[in-house]
Image: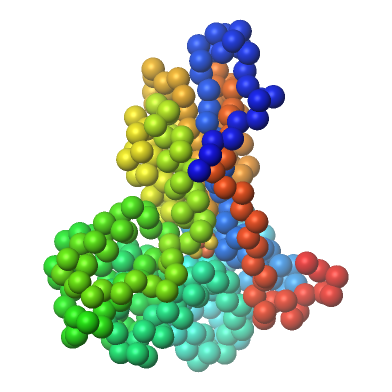
Amino acid sequence: MSASTPAADQPTVDQVDATNGKRVLLAKPRGYCAGVDRAVVTVEKALETYGPPVYVRKEIVHNRHVVDSLRERGAIFVDEADEVPEGALVVFSAHGVSPAVHEQASERNLRTIDATCPLVTKVHQEAKRFAREDYDILLIGHEGHEEVEGTAGEAPEHIQLVDGPEDVDKVSVRDPSKVIWLSQTTLSVDETMDRVDQLRERFPALQSPPSDDICYATQNRQVAVKAMAAECDLVLVVGSQNSSNSKRLVEVALQAGSKASHLIDFAKEIDEEWLTDVVTVGVTSGASVPDILVMDVLAWLAERGWAEVQEVTTANEKIAFALPRELRRDLPKTGS
Ligand code: SF4
């Protein structure tokens, strides 16, 4: 892990004196992950290719700005597939859906485009495989979150949800030598490992997933915020209240030493009082947040004296996912 601050961007002593040392540490990576980018582009391309309306089951990604922008362009967000008119086009969100939702869509003759993030699909595949092998699966995740509902729906008879520490004593397994844990992709890495340790005390033979379920984007954003939090009096996390990975960034910032941290959708939600006695402000954003919202926050801070921005880089992400096959088929050959 390294904090990269190009020498050319360093403030002079005079500049620092003029601002009383006020500075912003800007986390990198932050914002859009490959799965969110793919899901948003999927709805945009569907609107362009088929014309509005395009129905979307649930919020395509958990971000108010993104959802409102797509709604303005003709996307209609619904809670369930049975709200979509027979035969219409529906996009499934990045968080994934259970087989029951696919069946419901097929009963209504809906045309579907599945924008489930491939890293969520990977967890679905693990759930199916270990259910087939007759394991008891302990799924660490947040009750009611769409991703958890989708994953649990793959093998409801084999999966039990472990949300908080209190759930560890509640689970019961048929054969303690055949138990595996899986997790939601957007959890706090540290808390998840605490939960695994707790589970392993009850079930010493508990097996781990073949590879990390918490995705690269969630992990990278947490590592970046950890690298700067101890130097921050305040960390602002741009993200929506229903965004799991964004909420985890607030918790990680506080655990890693920031004196305060708040989750905001937009710059206008920043309370000036939060800046009392603050010198260093950390800024980051969740995986469903377009960078324009972060730039708005930087502009808001600059107007109030925090114009000096130093980027803290802990990883450079280059991952991209191909658009869903059912959409690619219909795109013009010259299209991306
Ligand atoms: S946060 Fe991770 S799992 Fe969720 S969409 Fe992004 S890459 Fe996929």
Instruction: Residue 181: give x, y in percent of width and height.
Output: 31, 72
Q: Is residue 284 above or below residue 271?
A: below
Q: In which image quadrant can residue 275 be found? A: top left
- Quadrant where the C terminus sits is bottom right
Q: Is residue 197 above or below residue 8?
A: below
- Position of 205 with respect to 221 (left or right) is left
Residue under the image location 37 percent in, 54 percent down: 188
Examine the rendering and report whether any part of residue 126 can be seen.
yes
Report the front residue among 293 and 6: 6
Q: Is residue 313 above or below residue 38?
A: above
Residue under the image location 39 percent in, 17 percent down: 277
Q: Residue furthest left?
A: 169
Q: Residue furthest right?
A: 334
Q: How is the image coloured?
A: rainbow
Instruction: Residue 137: give x, y in percent of width and height.
Output: 30, 78
Q: In which image quadrant can residue 180 be found? A: bottom left
- Position of 278 with respect to 198 (left or right) is right
Report the front residue among 145 and 222: 222
Residue under the image location 64 percent in, 75 percent down: 324
Examine the rendering and report whether any part of residue 77 can be seen.
no
Residue under the image location 51 percent in, 69 percent down: 119
Instruction: Residue 30: give x, y in percent of width and height.
Output: 55, 46
Report the front residue among 39 and 71: 39
Q: Is residue 34 above or below residue 282?
A: below
